[in-house]
Amino acid sequence: MTIPAQFDAKSVEQKWYDYWMKNNYFHSEPDHRTPYTITIPPPNVTGVLHMGHMLNNTIQDVLIRRARLKGFNACWVPGTDHASIATEAKVVAKLKSEGINKNDLTREEFLKHAWDWTDKYGGVILDQLKKLGASCDWERTKFTMDPDMSASVIKSFVDLYNKGMIYRGYRMVNWDPEAKTTLSDEEVIFEERQGKLYFLKYQIEGSSDFLTVATTRPETIFGDTAICINPEDERFTHLKGKKAIVPIAGRVIPIIEDEYVDIEFGTGCLKVTPAHDMNDKTLGDKHNLEVIDIFNEDASLNSFGLHYQGKDRFVVREEIAKELEANGSLAKTEIHLNKVGTSERTKAVIEPRLSDQWFLKMEELVKPAIKAVLETEEIKLYPKRFDNTYRHWLENIRDWNISRQLWWGQQIPAYFYGDGKEDFVVAETKEEAVILAQKVTGNADLKFEDLHQDADALDTWFSSWLWPMAVFGGIMEPENQDFKYYYPTNDLVTGPDILFFWVARMIIAGYEYAGEKPFTNVYLTGIVRDKLGRKMSKQLGNSPDPLDLIEKFSADGVRVGLLLSASAGNDIMFDEELCNQGKAFTNKIWNAFRLIKGWEVSDSIEQPESSKVAIEWYEAKLQQTLAEIEDNFEKYRISDALMGIYKLVWDDFCSWFLEMIKPAYQAPIDRKTFDKAIVLLESNLKLLHPFMPFLTEEIWQIIAERTPEEALIISTWPELKTFDAKLIADFDFASEVISGIRTIRKDKNIPFKDAIELKAINNDNVSTHFDSIITKLGNISSLEYVSEAVNGALTFRAKSNEYFVPISGAINVEEEIAKLSEELKYNQGFLKSVQAKLSNEKFVNNAPEKVLEMERKKEADALSKIATIEQSLASLK
């Protein structure tokens, strides 16, 4: 078979992916083998592949392919998340572009549009993962809105409600005015922003006096229901029991006293807006203050905003400042830095808002999750430093707001039968709800039509926290065969940014519903950034299209480029040059394979000693590297594992081993060496396969005609055996000798075709086992060990051994003596200048220690060079 000069990644990738799919290598069913299971962190159903997905899924594919080679029953479950906020926003935008307002639709009509959108775009990202080589069990693909997945979510809600862990409460929540829904605390990202501090003057009722209040949000004055002072603040004793008038609004509000107010902060007076600040709400409850909500759901002002009604809060902020200044109510403004809460999904500034919501009590639920990671270490986070982050969050956790004012998602299974807020029942189906409501009310005539279901949907994370269990039917049928076989899963690969949102919650759910951990190891990847350190984003335009990268550098090249710099938990400064490095590695392996297959093989010639020694060495080196690789995989140092294989193949196999066994020009290679070279190449391919699946399968299949049962993807990982460490050390020394010979040839322009003699004084008594290699790679006509220096020879050292290359006929002695004499003169002059500095007391006393160290090193280097030159000159004379 003619092997192409270039590796054609495009045709090869599609060919082998189709072959793997056709032969069902990715699919898993319970059997006698030990399972190895990964569940994919489900990307948003409407998402497309980005660099973070590339990194995350490449690591998962490496782990699953290695497990397959190691004989495990490997199962990688793929899927997507319905992503309530993001998907609903896209559907609403699409409808708007078509002139349709969501509010004009029924829930059922809207959901039809949402499902149409999902059906159209939902599989895009999973198809893109196939281009990367992801060997997921596609037959097990799940979607968080699949009927069985939704049923699992509803069942868990009902179960937790019946246990008294879910409750409905009127609370201050985080409101996203763009998505028009509440968010949990964990979905609020605080950013430091520069704004203004407005000093507002409130007139004291029945007086011409004023008090001044500092605020960052002057638009909220319409919701003020009190001014608060500290009872110990002597500056405001005269205000006790009095009232103030809200500027513009003209409303009269009480001046209250509370120790909560910091005397040293701002003006010492605090405006209290209970509907729009968590702390103000606490004060309001304590002092029975009126609660005035001034915002619509999109954060525009409502009728309480008077002539600002209908305007956006930030527009009002600018306009009201001008009006306050015009009427004398604005004392001054100052530039002010403060933390602003923003939506993790829409980036909108969060608005605190009071509303009825559903909450999950977390205090007891988190205890097994804390114990599993921080005490028993049943679950391990890699890198371990994330333990502290995990601890901080779980030990300071608050009840989880699990309701969202959205239609896309699992609708909360609460059914109202009366007018009161507490007139509801919770059930898995409406039929069950009717029966429950009849019992609660004692009204046997209560019908299906008399109930209306809560309009809110559940938080997406409340769905995905069941993911490792629900994908195997573990919530609905906990005794089913798949769940009992595949759960708990082995490894989870995800980003540290969802350690709270998802990882910790899956651990909590695992112990609550299955009584055990959902996975054993959590590998937390870094964030992919550009070479300037900026997080990649569409807005910055600094994120390359992963499919374009695959087109340009090949899937294997991109995988290698990403992983070479992807140590656990550390951010990756991505540069396309990394992918180019991966592509170069692909070409190196391909060319090495072509070299081997290009040799003519003879069954009649004997195996040279040099080839026999080379094979012994490489077998030992492969085993040493394999031991290091296994250790790195054990510690989830995937980048280090790849680097070990990279060096083994590039340096040891391609640069050294193939040179050692390569036959002379146009001469054949012996059968024994050739066959062993193929075996060792196949071992390399097995180690490389998890990282570079397409290239390795292509070479594997060209080496020999294979049946589907003999494909590389399901072959056997190399067996770890003991190896001769001394043999490896002896070769390291021999390689120094070869480098010394090559340096002399280069420096003295001695062509490689000209054989030279080599004599050595073996001061270190090193092994002569690799002499045949030294002879071949140095083109040595004879190698002799002597007891004293050889005159008329070029010299070099390896450790304390001295090596001599007799120069008779090889070089012009007179020219070489002149050249060395000139070099000696220069180095002696340089030494003299350095020693002059070091003998100068003033310089030595005043120079920094680093400078002195550098000068002493210069002196030592010069002395060494002079000794070597003098030795060479002595041998030439």
Image: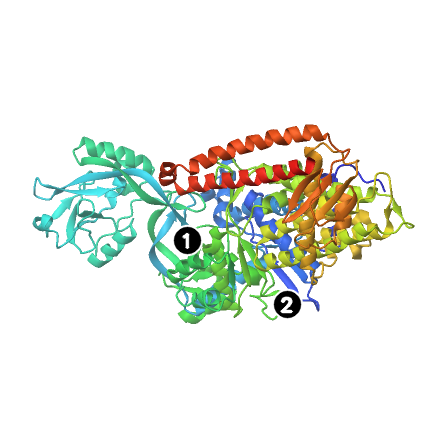
Q: Nearer the viewer, residue 782 or 458?
A: 782
What is the secondary structure assignment of the residue under circle 1?
helix
Q: Earlier in the sequence, mark 2 or mark 1?
A: 1
Query: Residue 484's x, y, as percent?
Result: 62, 69
Query: Residue 830's x, y, as percent?
Result: 51, 32
As drawn, 841 above or below 292: above
Which quadrant, please, contains the C terminus?
Answer: top right
Query: Residue 181's x, y, as percent?
Result: 41, 49
Q: Amino acid at mark 1?
A: Glu
Query: Residue 377's x, y, as percent?
Result: 50, 66
Q: Residues within 10 Å of mark 1 (few under 14, many from 20)?
A: some
- Residue drawn where x is 43% and y is 70% of the image: 163
- Residues at circles 2 and 1 in contact by the CB criterion of under 8 Å: no
Corner quadrant of residue 171: bottom left
The residue at which mark 1 appears reads as 186
In the figure, is residue 514 to the left or right of 326?
A: right
Q: How is the image coloured?
A: rainbow
Mark-to-mark CA distance, 2 and 1: 33 Å
Numbered circle sitting on residue 515: none
Is residue 458 visible to the viewer in this orientation of the structure?
A: no
Is residue 221 visible to the viewer in this orientation of the structure?
A: yes
Q: Nearer the viewer, residue 156 or 397?
A: 397
The residue at which mark 2 appears reads as 485
- Residue drawn where x is 10% and y is 48% of the image: 235
As drawn, 316 above or below 389: above
What is the secondary structure assignment of the residue under circle 2?
helix
Q: Amino acid at mark 2?
A: Tyr
Which quadrant, please, contains the N terminus?
Answer: top right
Q: Residue furthest front?
A: 877
Q: Nearer the viewer, residue 496 or 248?
A: 496
